[in-house]
Image (cartoon, rainbow, N blue to C red):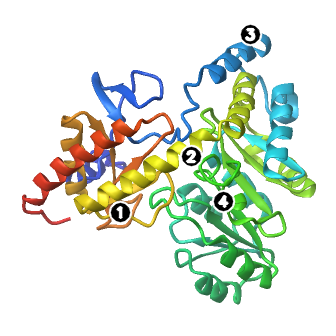
Amino acid sequence: MPFDLHSRLAERRCAHLYRQRPLLETPQQPEVIVDGQPLLGFCSNDYLGLAGHREVIRAMQQGADRWGVGGGASHLVMGHSTPHHELEEALAEFTGRPRALLFSTGYMANLAAVTALVGAGDTVLEDRINHASLLDAGLLSGARFSRYLHNDAASLAKRLAKAVGNTLVVTDGVFSMDGDLADLPALCATAKASNAWVMVDDAHGFGPLGANGGGIVEHFGLGIDDVQVLVGTLGKAFGTAGAFVAGSEALIETLIQFARPYIYTTSQPPAVACATLKSLELLRRETWRRDHLNRLVARFRQGAADIGLALMDSPTPIQPILVGSSERALELSAALRERGILVGAIRPPTVPVGSARLRVTFSASHTEAQVERLLDILAECWNRLAEEPEADA
């Protein structure tokens, strides 16, 4: 048999790495029904609670009434509708850049940007724990590819000294499995000294970070001269779907001309763009959402420390609890679920071996009482688990 798929799947089960899709039977919200079970969820990336906002839903319904439900074609054929164009202009203004370009997914945006900018004879340097879409983009670009130590400007400098051709430094803004921030001031200064460009995927930063929700670039007070390529995802804090790249006029025109994931993909439904325009308005107007979210995160970190949980250095709504072995992470996730709490276990290869964790995420839709409930049940389950002997990872 040329493809022994059953053995591969069996090996993954034995290693406690088998993945299963929970079936969500409600909209994105704190109180959900998953696989028929009512649960309090702490694993959505809907950070500002906009995915179920009435005004966003209404904007999408009205958009569908006017523009239909399909993009119809790629942007370069006949799929670039007025809502797409208006959203691109709004995102450019929001990020303080000349132009922005819409994509159907964040994976596509990252793949498009990297592969359109560098190729054979060039260099792409990436943080060691970048998102898989960024790593794949670097590998597929055909450029000389190397990873520097996590958030380490000195390690980046060593690799820059060996770079050839056009050089692109690529990093997440907020690292999705750790929740920590990229040290952008140091990374950008190091890149600038070597005439390299910087690309930031701020999928998890837009919305929660910055005085106006403008993400990590706004958080650090940086501009287009520091971060030439800025990528954002619309399916997280914006509460809708899709992604964008923001930058100079020349950058966006280059992507339109050379980025294969953009050229050869049908545009997103125009109604989604209508919804995103409304969510962008709410993101900027309702600043209380970020304030409330920050209070929830601060309370959780204090409570987790009192329990004795091992948290990571994260000021964001992503609050991973380090557990260690994959088996133990699954046990803790299952124990929480038995008590009505939904938190996913993150295991290799998404994170390094021996660093399996529960990835707790917060939304502005969560209440303080719900966070207290999470902490109470976490304490009970953690203490019970600590009394049990741990198997090998």
Question: Label 2: how many residues lie within 10 Å, few (<14), some (14-19) or many (20+)?
Answer: few
The quadrant in which residue 65 appears is top right
Q: Position of residue 336 (x, y in %)?
A: 23, 42
User: What kind of residue is marked 1?
Assistant: Leu
Horizontal relation, residue 267 to residue 385: left or right: right
Task: Give whichever of discs 2 and 4 has the lower sequence position.
Answer: 4
Q: Earlier in the sequence, mark 4 or mark 1?
A: 4
Residue nearest the viewer, comparing 311 with 7 = 311
Q: Which mark is residue 65?
A: 3
Give percent across and percent down for residue 130: 55, 64
Q: Nearer the viewer, residue 84 or 359?
A: 359
Mark 3 nearby-residue class (10 Å; few <14, some 14–19, many ≥20): few
Chain-order first, disc 2 or disc 3: 3
Helix, strand or loop at mark 3: helix
Secondary structure beneath label 1? loop
- Which amino acid, mark 3? Asp
Indicate which disc, 1 or 3, sits on the residue closer to the N terminus: 3
Residue topped by disc 1? 311
157 w.r.t. 168: above or below = below
What is the C-alpha distance between the residues marked 2 and 3? 35 Å
**Marks 3 and 4, Cα distance to the nearest angstrom?**
36 Å
Residue 344, how many percent across, how many down?
34, 45
> In the figure, is residue 208 to the left or right of 34?
right
The reply to whether dot 2 and dot 3 touch (C-beta < 8 Å) is no
**1 to the left or right of 276:** left
Looking at the image, which residue is at 87% across and 54% down? 254
